[in-house]
Structures are given as C-alpha cells and as structure tokens.
Image: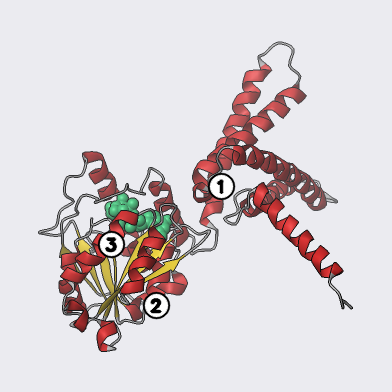
C-alpha cells in the first residue's frame, strides 16, 4: 500500500529526490530502491540514478525498475565519467525542494533520510550532512591508514572552507535544491568531493547541521575509490586556489612534465659516461625517454578516466609522439619569433617551451585521450556506411 502515498499515485510532486550516482552497481540498485521504500514510507519521494553507462548493466537495471515504478528514474551518461559531475546532473534533474545524495552501495544509512528531511524542512539550514565524525557517528571498521588519510584530507579541506564541518569528505548529505543551484556555476565538478566543492563554491555561507551515522560495509561490487582519489582531491583544492583559471588537468600535466625533465636529465648524465655515445644520440635518447615517461604517467594519472590499454596504448603512444614533435616545432617557431631583434634568449626560449607544453596538452587531450575516442574498426564501419549511402543516393532515380 505504500504506493498510495507516493508522488506518482497522489499526483503530487516529490518533496524529496534521492540522487544516486552509479558506476557498476547493478546488484545494489533493486535492493536500494526497496530500502528507500521502507525508510521513506509515507513521504513523497523519488530516486534518480545517474549512471555513467556502466558495463555491468546498472543503467538497464534502473530502467527496468523505472518501468514499473514512476518514483524511479535514471539519467544515463555515455562517454562521461565522474562522481561529482554525476551528482550535479542528478540534482539539476530534480524539481523537489530537497535533494539527498548518497552512495548506491548501502554504506550510507538510508534510515537517516527522514530525520535529515525534517531538519531541512524546519527552514533554518540549507544543508544536512551525514557525518561519521560527530558524536554518535562512526566510520565502522576502517583500516588505520584509511582513517588517517580521511582525517588528513578533512583537515586540509577545513583550511579551505573554514573550521566547523567535521566531515567535509562525506558523500552523504541533503540540501535545499535552491542552495545547490546557486553554487552550480562555480562548482569545479572534479572527482569525488562534491560536498567540499559545494561549500567552497556557494555564493553565500551554507547553514548546515551534521547528523551522525555509522558508515557501513559496502553491499555488493567494489569501491571505485583508488589511490588516485588523492590526486583528484589535490586537483580540486588547486582549482579553488587558482580560482578556476588554470585547468586542473593542465596542472597535473605540468607536474608530470617536471618528472619527464628529471628523466631527461638522468638519461643525459648516464649516457655521458658511456663510451662511444655522442651528445646528439644522448639528447635524442633522453628526449624519447622523457616523452615515453610522460605518456605513461599521463595515461595513468591525468587521463585515467580515458585510460588507454592494449593496442590503444601503442596507437596512443605513437600519436602522443607525433603531437609532441609538432609541439617542438611550434616551440622553436614561437621562440624564434619572440627572439627576433632582441638579444635575450631566456624569455623567448621559455615562452616557446610554454607554447609547446600547452599545445601538447591541449591536442593530446583532444586526440589521444578523447572521451569520444572511437576504435579504428568503428571508424572504418562508419566510413563504409557513409560510402554506401553516397552510392545509394547517386544511383537513386530522379536525382537532380
Ligand atoms: N555516475 C558515476 N560515475 N558514479 C560513480 C562514479 C563515476 O565515475 N564513481 C563512483 N560512482 C558511484 C559509485 O557507484 C557509488 O554509488 C558512489 O559513487 C560512491 O563510490 P564508492 O566507490 O562507493 O566510494 P567509496 O565508498 O569508496 O567512497 C564514499 O565515501 C567517501 C567517504 O570516505 C563516497 O561517498 C565518497 O563520496 C566519500 O567521500
Ligand atoms: Mn561506497
């Protein structure tokens, strides 16, 4: 009978939207909707899954539920990845005054939702955060390392947003939709830390309370958090620090470029002491070494969401080398242009190098690590189709 009080049955719009980003969570979708049904009995709620075209069929599982339950919807994003951006799109698809965000894996306690809603509807706060660190909350059984990392990241974040929030890393919160919408234009939408992003981006200070809950074990599937979340986190902090003026990926790319420089120097020094090597071959080998190092590091870190594997890796490396050679030509050209007339070498030289770096970054991001990258076979299939259409059109009768 629960269906009678839901928004669809009463024709009433939902008071609460629960936004759930998913990436390979097929087996959690249906149990989660049942758990929400129990926890939110008597309330007008809906759930929006935001799935990034998971390979395991999570999107299809959510759509199947939606076919028999109008409270369930699924936004499906193709060629995109990212928890924060998924959350943003989910919230923007809601028309409810209050929106909750939680994981699909039962780690966040859905039984807390009604209390969060009551607190939010009281009207004196914009945001209710589910916290593991206030009195009564707990991280469950986390390893000491994870606990320390989480605390450390929390401490860093508090430097950015001010001191009172105990759990800025939380992925479990409920917000007044208007308050969220006001911050959307300023959001970095990077990585995992949407709550921190929200606090740092809101045009006016967010009034919030924290309610305790215990972080549970994940139900099915595995965590998508890996060692690189720290990188994402630092990217988010940097983006806020540089006021969004420099693309965070370019910062990471530049840092990796420094590593490449180190590799270059190491190879040079090493080869100088090898018998029978010329400077030219040393410099060539060092350049190659630096490019290859940069390629693999960028593949693993900067562009991990479009990470190349298998044969793609070979093509990618070839493409990257080609792009970098063109970058070198641009570098020298620009430097020469700036240097013409003046006597100083350093500034024009660095300007050329900077140009080259920007070129390499921008072009390889578009071509080598494009989110819309097509495999050669599908490109060939598209081409064949085009040719067939042209043939059919030219042999069609009555053509002008
Ligand atoms: N659409 C989409 N796209 N969803 C994603 C993506 C993505 O790229 N990556 C992860 N998700 C979904 C997962 O399917 C899950 O529902 C939720 O986002 C959180 O991912 P988990 O893999 O379960 O993360 P976690 O449990 O390790 O981390 C959680 O706790 C942290 C606190 O320590 C998250 O809630 C974090 O936001 C939180 O900071
Ligand atoms: Mn989780």
Q: Is residue 374 left or right of residue 156?
A: right
Mark 2 C-beta to ligand 1 under 8 Å: no
Q: Nearer the viewer, mark 3 or mark 1?
A: 3
- Residue at the disc numbered 2: 181
Estimate the x, y position of residue 16 in percent, counting from the top left.
27, 78
The reply to whether residue 202 is in sight is: no
Q: Which mark is residue 44?
A: none
Figure quadrant of the C terminus: bottom right
- Residue at the disc numbered 1: 253
Q: Is residue 199 left or right of residue 80?
A: left
Cβ–Cβ under 8 Å for marks 2 and 1: no
Estimate the x, y position of residue 146 in percent, counting from the top left.
26, 43
Q: Note whether 105 is above or below 199 in the view shown.
A: above
| Of 150 and 366, the residue lying toward us | 366
Quick one: label 2 or label 1, which is nearer the N terminus? 2
| Of 242 and 301, the residue lying toward us | 301
Colour mode? secondary structure
């Amino acid at each position: 009978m629960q269906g009678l009080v839901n928004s669809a049955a009463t024709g009433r719009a939902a008071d609460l939207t629960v936004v759930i980003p998913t990436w390979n969570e097929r087996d959690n979708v249906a149990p989660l909707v049942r758990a929400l049904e129990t926890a939110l009995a008597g309330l007008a709620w809906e759930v929006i899954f935001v799935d990034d075209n998971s390979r395991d069929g999570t999107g299809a599982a959510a759509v199947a539920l939606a076919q028999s339950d109008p409270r369930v919807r699924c936004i499906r994003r193709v060629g995109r990845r990212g928890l924060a951006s998924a959350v943003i799109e989910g919230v923007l698809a809601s028309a409810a005054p209050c929106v909750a965000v939680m994981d699909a894996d039962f780690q966040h306690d859905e039984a807390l939702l009604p209390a969060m809603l009551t607190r939010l509807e009281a009207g004196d706060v914009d945001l209710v955060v589910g916290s593991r660190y206030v009195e009564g909350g707990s991280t469950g059984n986390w390893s000491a390392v994870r606990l320390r990392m989480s605390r450390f990241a929390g401490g860093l974040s508090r430097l950015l947003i001010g001191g009172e929030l105990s759990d800025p890393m939380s992925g479990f919160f409920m917000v007044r939709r208007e308050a969220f919408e006001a911050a959307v234009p300023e959001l970095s939408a990077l990585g995992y830390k949407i709550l921190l992003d929200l606090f740092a981006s809101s045009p006016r200070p967010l009034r919030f309370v924290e309610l305790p809950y215990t972080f549970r074990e994940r139900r099915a599937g595995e965590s998508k958090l890996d060692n690189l979340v720290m990188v994402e986190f630092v990217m988010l902090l940097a983006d806020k620090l540089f006021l969004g003026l420099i693309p965070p990926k370019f910062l990471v790319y530049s840092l990796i470029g420094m590593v490449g420089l180190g590799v270059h120097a190491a190879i040079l020094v090493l080869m100088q002491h090898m018998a029978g090597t010329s400077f030219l071959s040393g410099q060539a080998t060092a350049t190659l070494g630096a490019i290859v190092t940069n390629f693999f590091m960028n593949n693993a870190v900067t562009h991990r969401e479009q990470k190349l594997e298998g044969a793609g890796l070979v093509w990618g490396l070839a493409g990257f080398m080609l792009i970098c050679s063109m970058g070198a030509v641009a570098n020298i050209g620009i430097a020469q242009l700036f240097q013409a007339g003046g006597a100083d070498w350093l500034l024009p030289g660095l300007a050329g190098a900077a140009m080259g770096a920007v070129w390499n970054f921008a072009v390889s991001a578009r071509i080598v690590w494009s989110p819309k990258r097509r495999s050669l076979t599908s490109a060939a299939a598209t081409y064949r189709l085009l040719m067939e259409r042209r043939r059919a059109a030219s042999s069609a009768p009555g053509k002008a």
